Every structure is written in structure tokens, then in C-alpha cells.
């Protein structure tokens, strides 16, 4: 089966072929670390993790790089307001970001380059652009000349008809229709030096513009042409458009082979905004008692090129879907393997499900279709187990299918981690309390059994009675 990805540049599904056989160079735009990311950002970061996992699942060696933007306008303004340096402002945000990635079960990137650690690379890249006539100096700053790059605008389809040569924009971010020469290097202001955001360069002390940062870091870490570049759809213009112009303008080589962009996340059908009180962070959701595995499930469950509408009802549904998978996995682990002398349909169902799962993921990483294949497998396998016991080897084949799928999705393993990280003394108390409840049920003392169940619930432990015996899981 062949993986196909939707490339934003060509506006088409393209068969995936990396530049080097068996090796994928993958660059993702990471966070701007002036404040913790919100769940819309986390959706994009988890998509990056999905791409990373699936490419490895397909047998590729993935060189995955995600940058950290630790110098730009908002960071400098924040450092000035806080009376600190840019490093002082960003250090705790960076620590928190890595903690959140771990909490959501993301695999580590190979490198997390920081902009402030790659200024020399940026200076060298700007020098190449000046030498090739793609940039010019003005008032101590350096600007990219979009009139010298005829292909400018091909990613975003931005309208260049009203552009007047020589118009310049110095801000790191600017409006969707504001097409002007953009800053590669910004002459230092007194405030920049005060917060540690000024570096020497041949054309004067200053700091890099936001857009040159990603070009320099991706070239330094992955080479002049990379296979995949991802980010949120809000980065198509100007950020990724400018990355193409400055990278290809400096090297004369194609910059990116496949551009992948993630749609916005809505909250209750509206745009997320701090002013509306609906800009949630991962910490907000965890403090409200929602599990990392359910959050991961929800943020991955919609196709990345579709808007995801976040609601707390949807988060509840994600938790229920995850619970169904965990219960099914538990059913495939009988306490005492039965002696069965007949074959079952489980291996055939597992093979069919694996094929359907891979076909869905090969179709532009279609997670909804991949999940549908998993739940079809759950339904059909449960129906088969309701009719007959299955040999241990057949149960193992079914469990292996879940394990294979979860190497891509990362939801079951994350849910299991929550139990594994519980305090051992607390775990022992849970087991002892469950045993006392079973003793009460055996003597038909249901009032005591209900009281014990309530005490477990108060401690955040949910107990479910099944034909195979009681099962429990942490609610929070």
C-alpha cells in the first residue's frame, strides 16, 4: 500500500516519495514560547506526532525536527513587561511545553532547535540572499525583495497585483492581504538589547525576523531540501510563503516536497479567543479532571484538514470510546486461558482490520476511517466471542492488532500509563478494597458493596461489573 498526502502547494493528493529512499526529513513549526500553548496548538503538535509515528510504522527512518521560536516581537514585549530577559521569560514556558508533550504521549523529536541558538546560521543565510540580489539593506535592517522572486505567492495564492515595489513591513506577523517586502534582520532598538535580543551582524547589531528563523534551522538540521514541512493553516501566509521565498532564493533548490497544514480548532462552534473565555490549555482540561488519553483521542479523531469543534460533550464521548477500546483489550486477556480445540475467526478479523486501518492512514492520514476500522473489529470480535471461546493464540492475534494500531495512535498506551504511575500504596489499597467489595457481593450484602464502590469513586476510581468480573480504572 502507498501513502498519499495532500500537499498544500500543489493543492492535490500526492504519492509520498522521500528524497532519499527509506529516510524522511520532517520539519514542524513548533511553539512561540511566550506563553503556554492552547489546545488548538496542541492539535497541531499531536498531528506532527501522528505523522512521525505513522512514517515509522511504515518502516521509514524519520529525522524529525520541531523548532522553538524563542525570539520575536511578542517575546520581547513580554520580557519588557516582566522586567526580565527573553531567556528568563521563555525558559519556564519551554519546560512546560515539554511536560505537556510527555503528558499527551508524544514521541520526542530528534532535535528541538531554538532560534536564539541558531543566529549565526541566520546571519549566514541572509548573507547568501544579499549576495544573490534577493535582499537589500535599509535603515540598519535587511529586507527580502519579493520582486526578485517571481514565484512568490504560489503557496498561499496571495494576490500580488496591488504590490508596489519597495514597500516594507517590519513586524514579525502581518495581515493576510498585506504583501510587502519582509524583514530578514531587524536593526536593534534599545529595548532589544535590554532583554538580550540583539546580536552582531555584518550589516549592524540587531535580531533576526521570525520568518528567517525556520529557514535557517531547517537547512542547518535537515539540509536545503526537506521532505515534509507541517504547521497550522494560519502559517500558510505569511510565514510559510516567506520561508519558501528566502530558502529557495538563497539556495536555488526546492525547499519542501510536501506541505501539510492543520485546520483550526473551534470551541462550541466559534473561534477560540481569550476575550471569549474559551481559550483552553491542556492544564485547564487536566485540572478539570479530564484524562490525557481522552484529550489525545479527541484532538486526533477528526481529519487534520477538517475543522475540529471542541466541546465538553465531545470530550466525554472520546472518553467513552477510549473506555470501549480498553474494555475490549481487557476481554482479550482472560484470567485463565481456556482449553479450546477449535479455530476462531479472530485472526482473519485482525488481518482484515489491519488492512483497513492501513488503507485509511495511507489515504492522507484519515484517522476517522482508521478508528472506524478499529471499532468494526471490536464489534465483530465481540460478537464472535459471545458465540464461542477463542484459543489463546487467536486472542493474542487480536491483541496484536490493537498494539499495532496503537503504535500509530498512542491512546491505549497513554491510558495504561495512568495506572502504571499511580502510587504503589494507593494501588494496593484499591486491590484490597475491591476484594472486600467482592466478599460483600458474595454474601449478598449489596448495601456494603455499594458503599465500598462509593468510597472508590470518591478516590477517583471507577468500578465496572462485567461478566468476566469487576474492572476498574482511574476517572481522573
Image (tube, rainbow, N blue to C red):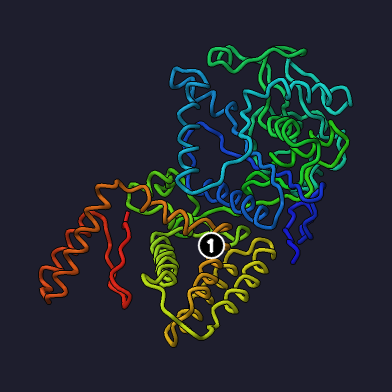
- Quadrant the N terminus occupies: bottom right
Q: Among all residues in the image, which is located at the extreme bottom?
A: 387
In this rendering, is residue 95 above or below 464?
above
Residue denoted by label 1: 403
Going by the image, does 312 lie left or right of 154? left
Q: Position of residue 421 (x, y in %)?
A: 36, 47
Q: Position of residue 3 (x, y in %)?
A: 73, 61
Residue at image location 36% in from the left, 70% down from the top: 335
In this rendering, is residue 366 above or below 390?
above
Q: Residues within 10 Å of mark 1 (few under 14, many from 20)?
A: some
Q: Which element type, helix, strand or loop, lies under badge 1?
A: helix
Q: Position of residue 319 (x, y in %)?
A: 40, 62
Residue at image location 66% in from the left, 39% down from the top: 65
Going by the image, does 238 lie left or right of 307? right
Q: Nearer the viewer, residue 1 or 310?
A: 1
Residue at image location 69% in from the left, 42% down from the top: 63
Classify residue 382 by image quadrant.
Answer: bottom left
Q: Nearer the viewer, residue 260 or 183?
A: 260
Amino acid at each position: 500500500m502507498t501513502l498519499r498526502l495532500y500537499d498544500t502547494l500543489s493543492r492535490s493528493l500526492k504519492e509520498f516519495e522521500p528524497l532519499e529512499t527509506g529516510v524522511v526529513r520532517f520539519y514542524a513549526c513548533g511553539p512561540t514560547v511566550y506563553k503556554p500553548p492552547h489546545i488548538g496548538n496542541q492539535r497541531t503538535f499531536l498531528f506532527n506526532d501522528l505523522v512521525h509515528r505513522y512514517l515509522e510504522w511504515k518502516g521509514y527512518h524519520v529525522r524529525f525536527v520541531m523548532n522553538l521560536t524563542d525570539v520575536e516581537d511578542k517575546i520581547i514585549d513580554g520580557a519588557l513587561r516582566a522586567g526580565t530577559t527573553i531567556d528568563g521569560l521563555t525558559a519556564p514556558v519551554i519546560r512546560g511545553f515539554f511536560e505537556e508533550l510527555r503528558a499527551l504521549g508524544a514521541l520526542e523529536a530528534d532535535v528541538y532547535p531554538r532560534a536564539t541558538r541558531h543566529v549565526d546560521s541566520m546571519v549566514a543565510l541572509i548573507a547568501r540572499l544579499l549576495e544573490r540580489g534577493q535582499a537589500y539593506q535599509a535603515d540598519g535592517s535587511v529586507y527580502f525583495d519579493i520582486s526578485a522572486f517571481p514565484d512568490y505567492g504560489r503557496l498561499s495564492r496571495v494576490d500580488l497585483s496591488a504590490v508596489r515595489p519597495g514597500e516594507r513591513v517590519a513586524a514579525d506577523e502581518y495581515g493576510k492581504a498585506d504583501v510587502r517586502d519582509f524583514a530578514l534582520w531587524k536593526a536593534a532598538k534599545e529595548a532589544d538589547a535590554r532583554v538580550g535580543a540583539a546580536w552582531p551582524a555584518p550589516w549592524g547589531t540587531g535580531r533576526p525576523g521570525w520568518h528567517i528563523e525556520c529557514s535557517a534551522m531547517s537547512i542547518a538540521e535537515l539540509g536545503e531540501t526537506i521532505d515534509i514541512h507541517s504547521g497550522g493553516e494560519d502559517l500558510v501566509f505569511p510565514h510559510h510563503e516567506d520561508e519558501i521565498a528566502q530558502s529557495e532564493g538563497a539556495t536555488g533548490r526546492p525547499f519542501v516536497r510536501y506541505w501539510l497544514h492543520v485546520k483550526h480548532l473551534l470551541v462550541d462552534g466559534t473561534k477560540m479567543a481569550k476575550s471569549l473565555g474559551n481559550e483552553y490549555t491542556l492544564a485547564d482540561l487536566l485540572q478539570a479532571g479530564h484524562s490525557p488519553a481522552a484529550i489525545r483521542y479527541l484532538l486526533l479523531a477528526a481529519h487534520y484538514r477538517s475543522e475540529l469543534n471542541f466541546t465538553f460533550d465531545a470530550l466525554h464521548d472520546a472518553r467513552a470510546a477510549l473506555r470501549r477500546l480498553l474494555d475490549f483489550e481487557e476481554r482479550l486477556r482472560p484470567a485463565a486461558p481456556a482449553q479450546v480445540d477449535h479455530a476462531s475467526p479472530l485472526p482473519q478479523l485482525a488481518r482484515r482490520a489491519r488492512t483497513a486501518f492501513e488503507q485509511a492512514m495511507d489515504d492522507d492520514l484519515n484517522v476517522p476511517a482508521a478508528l472506524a476500522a478499529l471499532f468494526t473489529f471490536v464489534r465483530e470480535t465481540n460478537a464472535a466471542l459471545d458465540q464461542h471461546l477463542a484459543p489463546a493464540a487467536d486472542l493474542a492475534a487480536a491483541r496484536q492488532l490493537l498494539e499495532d494500531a496503537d503504535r500509530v495512535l498512542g491512546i491505549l498506551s497513554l491510558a495504561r500509563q495512568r495506572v502504571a504511575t499511580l502510587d504503589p500504596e494507593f494501588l494496593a489499597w484499591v486491590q484490597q478494597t475491591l476484594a472486600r467489595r467482592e466478599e460483600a457481593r458474595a454474601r449478598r450484602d449489596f448495601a456494603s458493596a455499594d458503599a465500598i464502590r462509593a468510597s472508590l469513586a470518591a478516590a477517583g476510581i471507577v468500578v465496572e461489573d462485567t461478566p468476566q468480573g469487576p474492572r476498574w480504572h482511574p476517572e481522573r
